[in-house]
Amino acid sequence: MLKGFFTRDEDEDTSTARAKQIVIEGQEEEAEEALSLLSEGGDGLDQTMEEIDTAVKEAAKASLRDIRLMEEGRCPSCGHKTRQFLFTSVCANCGWFSFISPEEGKSIIHLKNADTIECGTTFDTRGDYILGITDGVVRAKVSKENVEYIEFAWTEDEIAKKRKTRAREQAGTCSWCEKLLTETKGEPTIVYAAFGNDQERYLFCAEKCEEAFKKQYPIRIHKNCYNRSCIGCDLCIKKYSGKDETLLQRLEDATV
C-alpha cells in the first residue's frame, strides 16, 4: 500500500522521485500507521483517497487560474491589472506583488544587529522565517523578527539581459518573419484567430507577412477568423477582447 505514496514507477527518473520525496521524508512510519487504521475501517481509505484526489484537482485549478491571470497581466488576488517592472509585478489595487531573485547575483539578508547573511536567493515562508538558499540548499533560516531588510544584488549583465528581454516582449516579434517589430519599417498589424478551441493573437511587422501567414495557415470555414470580428463572436474560447490590447501603442513607445 505504501508503494503508491512513496515510490514511483521504475521507468521514471530516480532523481525526480527523490526530489518529490523530500516533502514526506521522515513521515513513512506515520503514513503507514494511518493507512493501517483506515484499512481496518472499510470505506475509510477509499473515502480518504477520494478526498486527496479532489484536493489535488482543486489545487491544480487554483494554480492554473493564477497562472492564467498573471499571464494576462492581472492580479491573481483581485483580478485588477498589475504594473510590470523588470523583476517585479505589483497590483496597485490590493497590494499583491510577485518578484524573482537574482540568478547570477546574490541576496543579502540584513539583520537588525547589523550583521548580514549572503545567499543565492531567499524564500519567504509566509510564516515566521526567511529561508536563505544557495545552490539549491537551505543555508540559513532566519526569524523575520531579526530581519531589517533584504537586498537583491543583481549583476549589471543580468539587468541588461532582462531589459532586452522585456523590450522584446513589450514590442513583440513578427509571427511570420520573427523579426523584432521595433527593427522593421512596415505598419504593424494584429490578427486574432483560433485554429483550435482557443483564440490566439498574432503580430505582423507588415502587410506582406500577414498575407503570407494567412495563406500558409487558412482558418476553417465555419470560423472565418480572418474576416470576422472577435467582438460578439462565440465560436472559440476567448483570451483577448479582439481589440489591439495596447500592443501597437507599446510598440510606438518602444521606438521613441
Image (cartoon, rainbow, N blue to C red):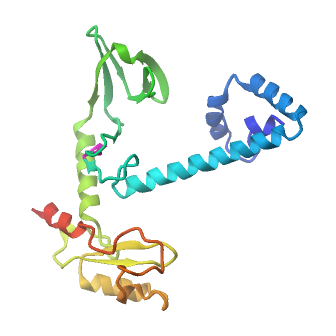
197 sits to left or right of 39: left
**Residue at (16% x, 76% y) in the render:** 185
> Magenta stretch containing residue 30, yes or no?
no
205 sits to left or right of 55: left
Furthest-left residue in view? 256
Image spot of residue 223 (x, y percent)? 46, 86
Nearer to me, 248 or 174: 248
Q: In which quarter of the image is the N terminus?
A: top right
Asked if 223 appears above or below 83 in the picture, the reply is below
Q: In which quarter of the image is the C terminus?
A: bottom left
Furthest-top residue in view? 113
Name the quadrant containing residue 55. top right
**Residue at (44% x, 56% y) in the render:** 68
Image spot of residue 148 (x, y percent)? 28, 17
63 sits to left or right of 71: right
15 sits to left or right of 245: right
Asked if 211 appears above or below 109 in the picture, the reply is below
Q: Which contiguous range is marked in magenta?
A: 85-91
Image spot of residue 85 (x, y percent)? 24, 46
Name the quadrant containing residue 132. top left
Asked if 31 appears above or below 71 in the picture, the reply is above
**Residue at (24% x, 76% y) in the render:** 205
**Residue at (82% x, 31% y) in the render:** 35
Nearer to me, 82 or 164: 82
Image spot of residue 232 (x, y percent)? 38, 80
Name the quadrant containing residue 157. top left
Furthest-bottom residue in view? 221
